[in-house]
Image (spheres, grey):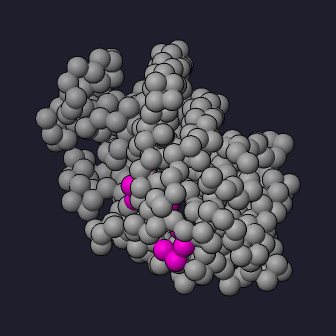
Amino acid sequence: TNALSCRIGIALRKEKRDMYTENLRVEIAHRIERIQNEMRIAGADALLLSTNANLYYSSGRVYGGYTYVPATGDAIYFVRRPVGLKNGNVVYIHKPEQIPALLAERGIAHPSCLALEQDLASYGECIRLSALFPDATVVNGSPVMRRVRAVKSPYEVKLLKISAAHHAEAYRRIRSVYQEGMSDIELQIEIERLLRLSGCLGLFRIGGSSMETFTGTLLCGTNADIPSPYDFAMGGAGLDPALPMGANGSIIKPGMSVLVDLCGNFTGYMTDMTRIFRVGELPELAYRAHRCSIDIHRAFRETAKPGVAASELYRMAADMAKEAGLEEYFMGHAQKAGFVGHGVGIEINEAPVLAPRSRDVLVSGHVIALEPKFVIPQVGGVGIEDTYLITDTGVEQLTEYPEEIAELY
């Protein structure tokens, strides 16, 4: 079994490598063009990127340095590390203060309006980068990247579909690693091992500085109702206050649900999927809430399409939970999350967000993880999460795995 998993992981890496070799240059050019279109709308004539997710998006890899996107023409990659990158638009630097002179050598005019990642980069870095062009007006470029990255290209969708397929395949083997008397963290470690052997990168990238996790969440019993510092439907105490969420060492016992929401990052693009397992029977309330979650997904698949407001989809889900008499448990019990779905891609919390005050409107190319979940006190979490692609004609489900609560043995 382990040898098979390793071969699957090796085949996955080759599949991705071949895809990159064939299409990446064209894809990056397309991305830069889309960034430039959004820059013009924002009034910026240059954008300087420095955070890992946006460096990856703009170049196809993470590196130490900066991507400089002018209003027209090719992006320039100012690289500190690693050595050895070869491309006509790669320029090695020791410090960002070299950038203005290097642009001048290429005949590129200095910007009059420079966009920086003010929502993501540190204050100190923004001040330093602003000083590179003292005559330029500085604006926030984070919304530019948020809008561009929210709409996935066919190339990105292919990567997401690869992740989805391997994500589901690993979940199909969860029951094979469960042993009676396991703790939640012991089971999570075994599932993480399955994922890694299957090619999962293990990187669960979250945008911003206010949320952290490790590969995802496995929760059972009362631990699912322990609040976390983050805007998650379920928290968990975690193993230490340094990472106060997730599995806490609880022994999995009959009458508990086991919620598995673990990393689907096999390609640099993440899918998000939650499934529920059990040992023995659960209370009727848990099955009823789980069925409501499935019903919400079905309603979403019928309703979501370009032009539909994200807030409308949130209200639909919340209304269905209320009509079922499950409002008390919807999106948390002791502490509730303020959303029912979110965009996914390079990061797990991209646009759009399905929340009551969201201004996002669905467009073709959005990829959304829908997660109408319920916390049943003393039992645990129930409800499914799946990743969907919004198309011109409606919804395409990317993650496919049986929806019903499954017995672990």
Horizontal side, residue 132 vs residue 227: left or right = left
228 or 381, which is in the foreground? 381
Quarter of the view holding residue 310 = bottom right
51 or 327, which is in the foreground? 327
The magenta stretch spans residue 206 = no
Q: Give the range drawn in magenta.
A: 213-223
Q: Position of residue 277 (x, y in %)?
A: 63, 58
328 or 109, which is in the foreground? 328
350 or 271, which is in the foreground? 271
Horizontal side, residue 18 vs residue 69: left or right = right
Q: Position of residue 364 (x, y in %)?
A: 72, 44
Kindly identify the residue that appears in the image at 48 percent across and 40 percent down.
195
Up-down relation of residue 375 to residue 121 (above or below): below
Quarter of the view holding residue 157 = top right
Horizontal side, residue 270 vs residue 373: left or right = left
Horizontal side, residue 341 vs residue 96: left or right = right
Kindly identify the residue that appears in the image at 63 percent across and 52 percent down.
409
Up-down relation of residue 390 to residue 308 (above or below): above
Q: Where is residue 220 in the image (x, y as percent from the top left)?
A: 53, 68
Q: Is residue 7 visible?
A: yes
Up-down relation of residue 249 to residue 386 (above or below): below
Up-down relation of residue 302 to residue 287 (above or below): above
The magenta stretch spans residue 217 = yes
Q: Where is residue 369 in the image (x, y as percent from the top left)?
A: 63, 54
Q: Residue furthest front?
A: 180
Kindly identify the residue that appears in the image at 55 percent across and 56 percent down.
261
Q: Is residue 140 visible?
A: no
